[in-house]
Amino acid sequence: MPENDVLQAIVTNLEKINGRLEVIEERLNKIEQRLDKVEQRLDKVEQRLDKVEQRLDKVEQRLDMVEQRLDIVEQRVAKLEQDVLVIKQDIVILKESNKELTRRMNAVYDQVAFLTEFRTEMIMFRDEVYKRFDNLEQQTGRLKEGFEYLRDISVEHEIDIRFLKKVVRAS
């Protein structure tokens, strides 16, 4: 019996060990299930990370494009600044030219005013000359009339003188 007891003890121990093994196997199964879930979650996390990486790649590409565009904008701004400097220089030149043109226009206005005044004086002088000429014509006309009158009188006097000479000779 002792052998039976030993065998019985071994069987009992084996049953206990089997029970424990079953519990351990259940726990291992649960752990494996949990690990599977963790792996699934990790796979999902990896997929999400892949998507995030893809998005980050797209963002980086966009940033590269933005940087390129910004470089172009900076170049254009630099060119615009140069153009503005040229325009400012042109404005200074135009202002000086405008001052010179204004000075010349003022001189032209002064000359026009002088010529207008001169023209007015010439018109007045012409009118005065015409008046004097008309007066001279009138006086010349009167003188002609006077000369004609005097000529007529002198002719009459000459006739009278001839007549008187004839009378004096006849007497």
Image (spheres, helix red, strand yellow):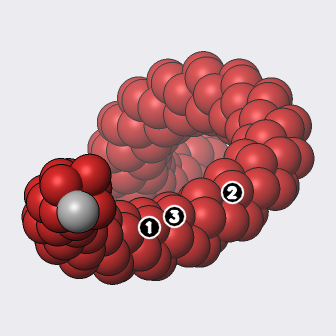
| Nearest the eye: 168 or 33 | 168
Q: What residue type is labelled 1?
A: Val
- Image coordinates of residue 37 in percent, x first then y, are 33, 52
Q: Residues within 10 Å of mark 1 (few under 14, many from 20)?
A: few
Helix, strand or loop for disc 1: helix
Left or right side of 146 for 68: right
| Nearest the eye: 33 or 141 | 141
Q: Can residue 8 be seen in this view?
A: no
Front tag of 3 and 2: 3
Q: Name the residue under label 1.
A: 129
Tell me, for residue 111, which label it has, or none.
2
Q: Can residue 119 be seen in this view?
A: yes
For the residues labelled 1 and 3, the Cα–Cα distance comes to 10 Å
Q: Give the residue at x 26% y 52%.
A: 169
Front tag of 1 and 3: 1
Tell me, for residue 17, which label it has, or none.
none
Q: Is residue 93 above or below residue 119?
A: above
- Residue most toward the front? 171
